Amino acid sequence: MTSERWTTRRLSPRGGGAREGWWGVSDAANLFLDQLAVWRELSFNGCEWFPRYMDYQSFPSWARETLEAHGSDSRRRYTFETLESAATHDPIWNATQRQLLTEGWFHGYLRMLGGKKILEWAPDRPTALAWMER
């Protein structure tokens, strides 16, 4: 951040939840700070202060109702082992999973895709949540 010469005086005076331009730095630095200071801290605090965050029953009722309303939708089903071994029909999932297996990481944006696919391909919603944690 030294190349950005950033100080708190460069924060945008406008609020309203808009992320672009909030930090008063380049787009790349803005994205980094948004991920670090907002989303990472939000996640850490959620885990710290909400001890049952991994329980399916802790989801808001509207979220559970939506998930359960689509539980019988026609879709592919996979085992955890199939997902883990990158043997699905989806080339993006497989490439992401292979990268995770060989390099120990994958791009952060793919975590959202991965979560959606696990939810889609697991036999039920509580199992999907357990697989995501695993």
Image (cartoon, helix red, strand yellow):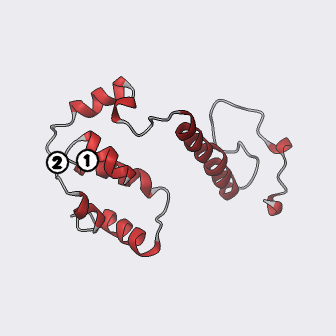
Q: Residues within 10 Å of mark 2 (few under 14, many from 20)?
A: few
In the displayed orientation, state which residue is furthest to the top.
Answer: 61
Tag 2 near tag 1, CB within 8 Å: yes
Image quadrant in which you'd find residue 46 = top right
- Between 108 and 84, the residue placed more toward the observer is 84
Image side of residue 132 versus residue 45, left or right: left
Q: Residue at position x 29%, y 30% from top?
A: 66
Disc 2 to disc 1, how far (Cα)? 7 Å
Q: Which residue is mark 2?
A: 75
Image quadrant in which you'd find residue 4 = bottom right
Report x, y in % for residue 122. Answer: 23, 49
> In the rendering, which numbered label is found on residue 120?
1
Q: Secondary structure at mark 2?
A: loop
The three-letter code of the residue at mark 2 reads Arg
Report x, y in % for residue 34. Answer: 64, 47
Q: Residue at position x 63%, y 37% from top?
A: 18
> In the rendering, which numbered label is found on residue 67?
none
Q: Residue at position x 33%, y 44% from top?
A: 129
Query: Quick check: 26 above or below 86?
Result: above
